[in-house]
Image (cartoon, helix red, strand yellow):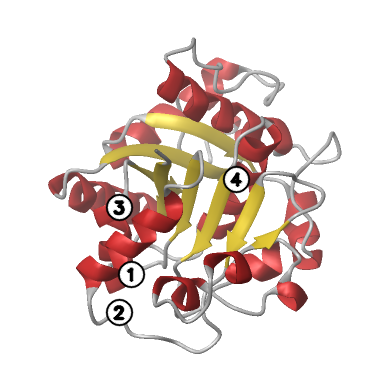
């Protein structure tokens, strides 16, 4: 059975798609068979972030509604064996049968070790569909107070629906926290009322690389190790192994300062 994971937040612009793509790549690099699925039917961007827009002929709706075989709709990645993408439809499609959509999507996901579902930045029908399938939700937030409020409300709604939630802090600016300009990690956990899964530092290199469809892999990306740690913690939750320390090999600064303001 696949571990089906939502990447979500009611607040847009927090880096959900970036997190979904790079976590999926790290899980695949760890030897897992991973399906990355774009459920943002308003503005699907995973094909752009992963650099495969020219190879995506069919989409997740084609697969779910049986218009095409799943194998025709899935895009693979030579540089990340084990990683597969089901892209969002180019033209918006309505989900008229949420339960049926969720059931068929779960069937498609069941052939993988992990399925990462990227959702839109709103309390939408597709998020409701995805939550019917999910074993875990990763709620993404940044330092921004509106982002933290969005993460709190998202996690609260999903927990009411019986979905476990974990917090992923994205674009974390350790320098600003050390200078008392932004909130620290513990305050962000308190604000969202959600257990922490990982911390991804602000990575200017990745910001420009993903415009070319390049994922964070290798020492030139300061976020690469952080995504690897987060993927390792997901693996540990499933296997019962000792979890990877969140900040291991990521931040070379006073860790006490980045934890608290």
Mark 1 vs mark 4, CA separation in Å: 20 Å
Q: Which residue is label 1 attached to?
A: 126
Q: Residue at x 36, y 49 (%)?
A: 148
Q: Are marks 1 and 4 in contact (CB under 8 Å)?
A: no
Disc on the earlier residue, 2 or 3:
2
Mark 1 vs mark 3, CA separation in Å: 11 Å
Q: Nearer the viewer, residue 30 or 188?
A: 30
208 left or right of 4 in image = right
Mark 4 vs mark 3, CA separation in Å: 18 Å
Q: Residues within 10 Å of mark 3 (few under 14, many from 20)?
A: many
* Residue 176 can be seen in this image: no
Report the number of discs.
Answer: 4
Disc on the earlier residue, 1 or 3:
1
Q: Residues within 10 Å of mark 2 (few under 14, many from 20)?
A: some
214 left or right of 3 in image = right
Can you give x and y, in whole percent of width and height, for residue 191 in the image? 30, 40
Q: Are marks 2 and 1 in contact (CB under 8 Å)?
A: yes
Q: Residue at x 44, y 48 (%)?
A: 141
Can you give x and y, in whole percent of width and height, for residue 104 in the image? 34, 63
Q: Which residue is label 2 attached to?
A: 95
Q: Which of the two discs, 1 and 3, sits closer to the camera?
A: 3
Mark 2 vs mark 1, CA separation in Å: 7 Å
Mark 4 vs mark 2, CA separation in Å: 25 Å
Q: Which residue is label 4 attached to?
A: 24
Disc on the earlier residue, 4 or 2:
4
Q: Which residue is label 3 attached to?
A: 133
């Amino acid at each position: 059975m696949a571990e089906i994971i939502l990447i979500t937040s009611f607040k847009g612009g927090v880096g959900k798609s970036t997190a979904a793509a790079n976590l999926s790549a790290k899980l695949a690099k760890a030897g897992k068979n991973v399906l990355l699925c774009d459920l943002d039917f308003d503005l699907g961007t995973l094909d752009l972030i992963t650099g495969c827009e020219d190879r995506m002929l069919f989409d997740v709706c084609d697969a779910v509604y049986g218009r095409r075989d799943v194998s025709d709709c899935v895009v693979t990645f030579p540089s990340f064996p084990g990683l597969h993408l089901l892209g969002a439809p180019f033209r918006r499609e309505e989900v008229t049968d949420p339960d049926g959509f969720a059931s068929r999507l779960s069937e498609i996901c069941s052939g993988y070790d992990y399925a990462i579902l990227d959702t839109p930045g709103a309390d939408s029908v597709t998020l409701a569909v995805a939550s019917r399938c999910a074993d875990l939700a990763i709620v993404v937030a940044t330092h921004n107070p509106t982002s933290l409020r969005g993460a709190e409300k998202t996690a609260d709604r999903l927990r009411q629906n019986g979905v476990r939630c974990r917090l992923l802090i994205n674009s974390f600016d350790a320098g600003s926290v050390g200078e008392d300009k932004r909130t620290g990690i513990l305050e962000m956990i308190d604000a969202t009322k959600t257990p922490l899964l990982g911390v991804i530092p602000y990575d200017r290199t990745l910001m420009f690389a993903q415009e070319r469809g390049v994922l964070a892999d290798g020492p030139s990306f300061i976020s690469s190790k952080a995504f690897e740690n987060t993927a390792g913690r997901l693996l540990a939750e499933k296997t019962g192994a000792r979890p990877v320390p969140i900040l291991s090999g990521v931040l070379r600064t006073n860790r006490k300062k980045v934890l608290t303001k």
